[in-house]
Amino acid sequence: MTNQYIDVRNNQRSLLKPLQLKVCDTFISRLQGFLFSKAPQSEEGLLFCYKQPSRINSGIHMLGIPFPLAIIWLDEKYMVVDRCTAKPWGLAYLPKSPACYVIECSIARLIEFETGDQLLLLGRDWVKNEKN
């Protein structure tokens, strides 16, 4: 897992608080996720990054996670394609449409994101299509 963090902005609505995500761009960092961690504070979360859009590869599990999480799936242009509440110990959650990015954060943040919202991810040099 890199030690890079990004800030999230929602172009459709104001976020109640800043949201900063730790980047998970390796297999191991995505596999670990919040495993063996405490529930995230409302201003923090994880961003899983994948090279290609996919429903299967961007799916998540909650095995070993004893707290609920907000899950927000984004396409390659950072548009929200799906969102859900992931319950503790849930076996599998898949987006309705292919996704390249997955945000895992405090369940309290889910109300700030809707399918179709366009997000802006700030703080990454390699993030593509930030203005599209």
Image (cartoon, rainbow, N blue to C red):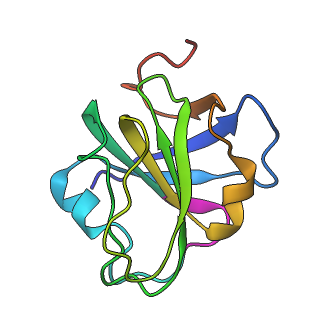
Q: Main secondary structure of the magenta part?
A: loop
Figure label count: 0
Image location (x, y in percent) of residue 1: 27, 56
Looking at the rendering, in which quadrant would you find the C terminus?
A: top right
Q: Relative to 35, does residue 101 appear above or below in the rendering?
A: above
Image location (x, y in percent) of residue 9: 68, 37
Left or right: residue 21 versus residue 47 is right
Residue 43 belongs to magenta span: yes
Q: Residue at x 52, y 34 (%)?
A: 123
Image location (x, y in percent) of residue 116: 63, 31
Q: Relative to 42, does residue 30 appear above or below in the rendering?
A: above
Q: Residue at x 30, y 51 (%)?
A: 2
Left or right: residue 52 versus residue 17 is left
Q: In the depicted view, which residue is nearer to us: 83 or 34? A: 83
Q: Residue furthest bottom?
A: 66
Left or right: residue 53 versus residue 124 is left
Left or right: residue 63 versus residue 16 is left
Residue 3 belongs to magenta span: no
- Start-end of magenta stretch: 40-45
Q: Relative to 30, does residue 124 appear above or below in the rendering?
A: above
Image location (x, y in percent) of residue 70: 57, 63
Q: In the depicted view, which residue is nearer to us: 96 or 51? A: 96
Q: In the depicted view, which residue is nearer to us: 49 or 124? A: 49
Q: Residue at x 39, y 72 (%)?
A: 34
Q: Residue furthest left?
A: 27
Q: Residue furthest top?
A: 132
Q: Quadrant of residue 88?
A: bottom left
